Image (cartoon, rainbow, N blue to C red):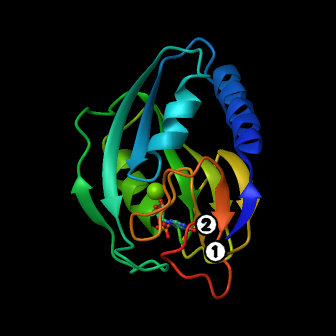
Amino acid sequence: MRLVFSPEQIREATIRLASRINQDYNGHQIHLIGVLKGAFIFLADLVRHITVPCSVDFVRLSSYGAGTETSGTVREVMPLVEPVTGRHVIVVEEIVDSGLTLARLLESLERQGPASLRVCTLVDKTGRRRVRIPVHYRGFHVQDGFLLGYGLDLDERYRNLPGIYVMEEGDAPSRNP
Ligand code: IMP
Ligand code: MG
């Protein structure tokens, strides 16, 4: 595994994204929706740099199972609790890949009539995008590669790493960095 984004780079990107959100929503209240499980670390760090009034909710979607490629079907494992009607909603993801997960979520949020709806992702991985996703806030752009750490997992492992790593050819999935 090779380090691609250090904890310091992630911190800088997170602060930059939060500042832009604070500017854009100045005078408004926002509702952040974290997509579990992957976004739990990013959202926790992001929210601590948000200065406009905000609330937080989570939705849990799953599309990967145990592999490194999307299965194409998105399951809603844990639905949203709070209604989003009339609220300024920002969906927070740690990574957007094919876009299928978000497309499905955005569609169902849109149906509830939010005041506005935007997407904030730490990593925008565009090489395998299958549907167009409007990403308003993105920390990093990568073309491809399977990333691990800072919430990103391979079969539930490595989420705890403070930096983001890319899996390299010949990596044994069971090895630690
Ligand atoms: P998408 O539906 O293909 O956009 O993928 C959405 C979800 O797949 C993300 O929220 C992640 O949980 C997971 N995912 C996508 N790319 C990666 C990766 O490189 N490493 C780990 N998980 C990933
Ligand atoms: Mg995710």
Residue nearest the viewer, comparing 100 with 59: 59
Q: Residue 163: percent from the left, percent from the top? A: 66, 51
- Across and down, in percent, residue 132 comes to 58, 66
Query: SS for tag 2?
Result: strand
Q: For the view shown, which residue lies furthest in the bottom direction? A: 170
Q: Sort mark 1 into few (<14), some (14-19) or many (20+) by Cα contacts within 10 Å.
A: some
Which residue lies most toward the front here? Answer: 176
Disc 2: which residue: 147
> Residue 90: horizontal and vertical position, in percent?
50, 37
Name which residue lies at 60% across and 54% down: 134
Q: In the image, what residue type sits under mark 2?
A: Leu
Q: Is disc 2's CB within 8 Å of ligand 1?
A: yes
Pick the quarter of the image with the N terminus: bottom right
Task: Indicate which disc, 2 or 1, sits on the residue closer to the N terminus.
Answer: 2
Q: Secondary structure at mark 1?
A: loop
**As displayed, is residue 169 above or below residue 54?**
below
Tell me: 138 left or right of 115: right
Residue in view at x 23 percent, y 58 percent? 77
Q: Which residue is mark 1?
A: 167
Amino acid beneath label 1: Met
Dots 2 and 1: beta carbons under 8 Å?
Answer: yes
> Spatial distance from mark 2 to mark 1, Cα to Cα?
6 Å
| Dot 1 beta carbon under 8 Å from ligand 1 | no
In the image shown, does 59 or 39 lie closer to the viewer? 39
